[in-house]
Amino acid sequence: MAFSALRLSAPVLKALAEEGYEKPTPIQAKAIPPALEGRDVLGCAQTGTGKTAAFTLPIIERLTKLGELTVPGHGAPARKPGRPHALVLAPTRELAVQIAESIGTYGRHARCKTATVFGGVGQNPQVQALKAGVDIVVATPGRLLDLIQQGHCSLAEVRILVLDEADRMLDMGFIKPIRQITGMVPAKRQTMLFSATMPREIVHLADSLLREPVKVEVTPVASAAPKIDQWVVHVPRTLKQSMLERLLESDDATSVVVFTRTKHGADRVMRRLVRAKVDAAAIHGNRNQSQRQRALGAFKDGSIRVLVATDVAARGIDVDDVSHVINFDMPVEAESYVHRIGRTGRAGATGKAIALCEPAERGALKAIEKLIGKPVPVMAMPQDLAAISALEPEPAAQAPRGGRGQRGGGGGNGARSAPRQGAKAGSGGGGKGKSPAHGRGGAHAKAARSDTGSTKLEHPAAAGQPARHPRAHQLPSARTPSRRGRR
Ligand code: AMP
């Protein structure tokens, strides 16, 4: 099916052709026709499916037809200060910015005027943009409510309401502001709600907001991402950083998103990568808006290769060519795994998703495998890291997640302390080594690799013992030349 079959207008078709879009994605093919008719839409689709265009194209078309936009040659706009005709609610500022960018792109020949409204930055520029008159407001709920309460924005003329990533908005505790905001939008309107998952709360919300919606669903969560090669590496917490750095040496790891569970974890991983001369930046809620935008911009334009992110911050990441998603920490909720790996394998590309699973995270892995309905193939650790791992205490004796293995310093010797020491590889401060591995600066990737030849330790499989993971595959690119510092 071609876009022209969807009966989109010439200015929009022109913009899509300029973007190089050849045909609608499944969610677009299903959602755009009823949305153009003004029907309510309940979309179950995650990021990467083209859902943004599925609701922004009908917004542009319908507002244009309502005569609310400036179309070349069609006279002055009927915009009123602070009184938009369409409202899109999104969970994060990054997502809000990206939706507004998409509207700017697809609506560039229809000249939609869009304002973004989100917290964490001064409100004056947003107030000025609203005052200048807008067709569409893309907003996070909290700041929008503030501006409404201060009299800078009214929803009295909203004709089209969209809730994007509704499940995430509820996860983030936005249900009350959402109820307040939707209560201010006239009942006579079109409503579209998109959500990657459909838990009971979303079904309730949809029931109360939508009227006889057309339900469209693509890539159900359980079978998400057919173009993503998924792997899990079983690795002690203490070796995760080394394993990560090893994975980043692969030639095809051109654009990598690394997920951590906490903001501090993201910063720590990023700092260690930078020390290892990997171009990396972190993006999370503690960063201010301009820092986040800068990091995201640098990642998008390829000037940094690795973006370390927490789940919430990553929701707005819209980059087509993410080659790898690496779960440094396993997600607490299995569904977040699907969201995370959905950052790669986008727009028809193939991606790799590699999870680093420590013993304490096996339960999380099981939950993920149950959700996706299949086991995640196991990738073996490189032999040198496996040898160090063999020195690790049994899982029962492991520090809990986020425990001492992450903090650095502190007591301990042997392999468990090695990576912390190893962050300063070559310092030789690895403590009272009982093994060749940690005695030479520990498990840090570089140090450990150079030790491989001389170490007497062997991978259990190589030593004739059963491998810990019978389905284990070899790490494909553990021996590829280093890419460090290449940009
Ligand atoms: P989304 O799911 O809306 O975040 O979109 C994922 C990515 O797919 C975005 O980077 C879009 O630019 C891209 N995209 C959306 N629709 C199409 C299409 N019909 N053809 C090619 N790429 C698309």
Image (cartoon, helix red, strand yellow):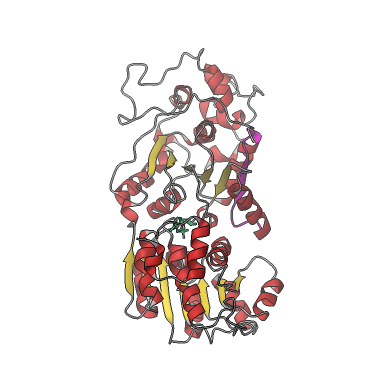
Q: Quadrant of the C terminus?
A: top right
Q: Position of residue 82 (x, y in %)?
A: 62, 82
Q: Quadrant of the N terminus?
A: bottom left
Q: Position of residue 278 (x, y in %)?
A: 61, 36
Q: Residue placed at 67% from the left, 79% from the top?
A: 132
Decide: is 70 above or below 448: below
Near-viewer residue (139 or 462) = 139
Q: Is residue 271 visible?
A: yes
Q: From the viewer's perspective, is 184 left or right of 214?
A: right
Q: Is residue 256 magenta?
A: no
The count of marks equals 0
Q: Position of residue 138 (x, y in %)?
A: 55, 71
Near-viewer residue (228 or 437) = 228
Q: Is residue 197 visible?
A: no
Near-viewer residue (206 or 461) = 206
User: In terms of image quadrants, where is residue 428?
Assistant: top right
Near-viewer residue (192 or 34) = 34
Q: Residue placed at 33% from the left, 63% from the top?
A: 217
Which residue is most to the front?
73
Decide: is 324 above or below 166: above
Which residue is most to the left?
373
Decide: is 108 above or below 343: below
User: In terms of image quadrants, where is residue 166?
Assistant: bottom left
Prevailing secondary structure of the magenta residues: loop
Decide: is 446 above or below 135: above
Q: Is residue 278 magenta?
A: yes
Which stretch did the figure color magenta? 275-288
